[in-house]
Image: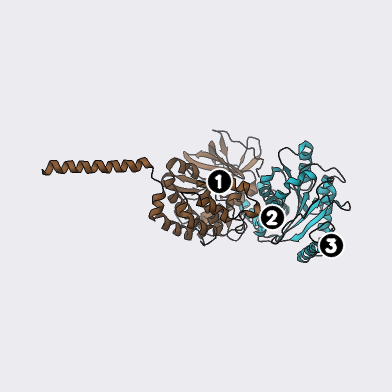
Amino acid sequence: MTTSFKLELRRGSVVVGKWKLGRYRVERLLGEGANGKVYLVQRDREWLAMKVGADAVDLQSEINVMKSLDKQKSHGAEPFLYDVDDLYGPDGREYSFYIMRYVRGTTLASYLKEQGAEWFPLVGLNLLGKLAKLHRAGWVFGDLKVENVMVADYGHVELVDYGGVTAVGKSIRQFTEIYDRGYWNSGPRSADPKYDLFSFAVLCIQLHEPKRLHALTKELLPQNRSMDELMEIAQGSAALKPVLGWLRRAMAGEFANASEGAEAWRVLLHRRETRRSASIPGWLKGLAATSGLLLAASIFWLVINIFL
Amino acid sequence: MKQILLITDGCSNVGMSPIVAAAHAKAEGINVNVVGVLDQGDVGELGAAEIEEIARAGGGLSRMVNMRQLSQTVQMMTRKTVVQTIQLAVQKELKHVLGNGSIEALPPEKRGEVVRVIDELGETSGLQVALLIDASASMKPKLAAVEEAIRDLMLSLQARQGKSEIAVFHFPGTRHGDDCIMDLAWTSHLNGVHSIFPKLQMGGTTPTGPAIMHVVEFYRQGQGQGSVHDYGAMGDYGRRGRQETDGMMGDYVV
């Protein structure tokens, strides 16, 4: 459901907070979420992200979540929230906003496209690590999907959009149908760590077989949606072969939380088949063989020259 | 909290104005949300305007969606309306204390605590949603999507910590000239309910206004019987009624 949120902040315009008078120069739009827009802004040469909400109450409950996450953080860890205030839009209306740290990086899908699918196992592990931290603090991420995972250099992962983060035991605040356990008739829509692991499994399938997953949601009758149907797609993907067993266990709720899931994922990661199936292109193998031959030839030549 | 969720695809054409009926509902403390379901075409300018006005009169939200978005929309609308209902109640209290009822007028630090209370109440308060389905001929191809949306809504409500129930009505009732017929009495789970709309005969007029009044009356009777806090008995009654009529709900009218 899209909200009628028409606020547009122009590049170069300066936002001044109504209460605390913080000044932020707008650089560009970073993205649009379910309940607001995120801009890249600058304050004293520092790059930050600013989320402007369509609804003050809605945005505030997201802020509340981030505040409690900040409180639970260990000392020295970077905070989520830098500032919370209101601004006057170009239309004269007031909008709430908050300032958070800017996550430099690309979306998960484009990262794998640019850097290669061989990064997938490591990025997956890092993502599970992020989820594990949330789970340990008593939260569930809720709206885990490809768009909400940013990846920076060397597979460093950050979660964005905390609108779905829910305390364990409550109803999931925000979700996306195809990642939702309830949509697949595979469990309740309430927050427990297993909910995130189900979404994580769907995310793996979405990354490797997006077309088939999309087709499946179109052709299946609602009552026939099940994790078996998802597994069938996964089985058809060569890249997912090493993690098939893991995906099944995650969807069936066999991992109590993301730490357990990460532990099992790590074991897979260091198995030889996993590494091998992270497809080495043919020409590279050829190159390796050729250089091997060359090396052998040069050593032979050296040995002959020096010792004879 | 009480809500009526009207799912329709066009204009009412008989009986009392649905806008007046929605205002009645609001007066009884029932919020009216309206979803206009489009297929390929449009609900027309007239239909769109009516849908928006019903919701405004009923203190609820309105949205135009296609069938694929129906479940998501129904679920989010219900959730949003819960928050808004509680927000209104909290703002009333704030007005007593501060003289100004708007949450936006509070400084950001104070806002946090108020919103925390709103969220908590939104999760734990009792909630009843009466779904009112337009079953005129043009809705026929959309009924499967409607039924899915109802199941999906139940799934979301079951995840809440507070007691949540739904009831389902459709209109027009094709027999005896009834305006509206109950398909499902208050229930908090749909397990075992195979089909919500048994062999519907679609068609006839679109008495949206009288149908809304019918549901308002259903809510009022629930109160009159003193069963506001215990809908379980009423739910049983509804189920028994359905079995007796062998899957046909045509004769069962509250």
Identify the colour of chain B in the image.
cyan
| Badge 1 amino acid | Arg
Instruction: Please name which of the two marks, 1 or 2, marks the residue nearer to the observer.
Output: 1
Residue A102 visible? The answer is: no
Give how far across and how far down residue A236 sits, in percent: 50, 50
Q: Residues within 10 Å of mark 2 (few under 14, many from 20)?
A: many
Q: Residues within 10 Å of mark 1 (few under 14, many from 20)?
A: some
Question: Which callout, 2 or 3, points at the residue further toward the start of the chain?
Answer: 2
Q: Which residue is mark 1?
A: A212
Q: Are marks 1 and 3 on the same chain?
A: no
Instruction: Please name which of the two marks, 2 or 3, marks the residue nearer to the observer.
Output: 2
Give how far across and how far down residue B118 sits, in percent: 66, 55
Residue B49 visible? The answer is: yes
| Badge 2 amino acid | Arg
> Where is the C terminus of chain B found, in terms of image quarters?
bottom right
User: The numbered mark 3 sits on a residue in which chain?
Assistant: B
Judged from the image, the secondary structure of the residue bearing numbered disc 3 is: helix
Q: Which chain is brown?
A: A
Q: Which residue is mark 3?
A: B224
Q: Nearer the viewer, residue B220 or A48?
A: B220
Tell me the quarter of the picture where residue A21 sits: top right
Q: Looking at the image, which residue sits at the far left?
A: A308
Judged from the image, the secondary structure of the residue bearing numbered disc 2 is: helix
Alpha carbon distance from label 2 to label 3: 29 Å
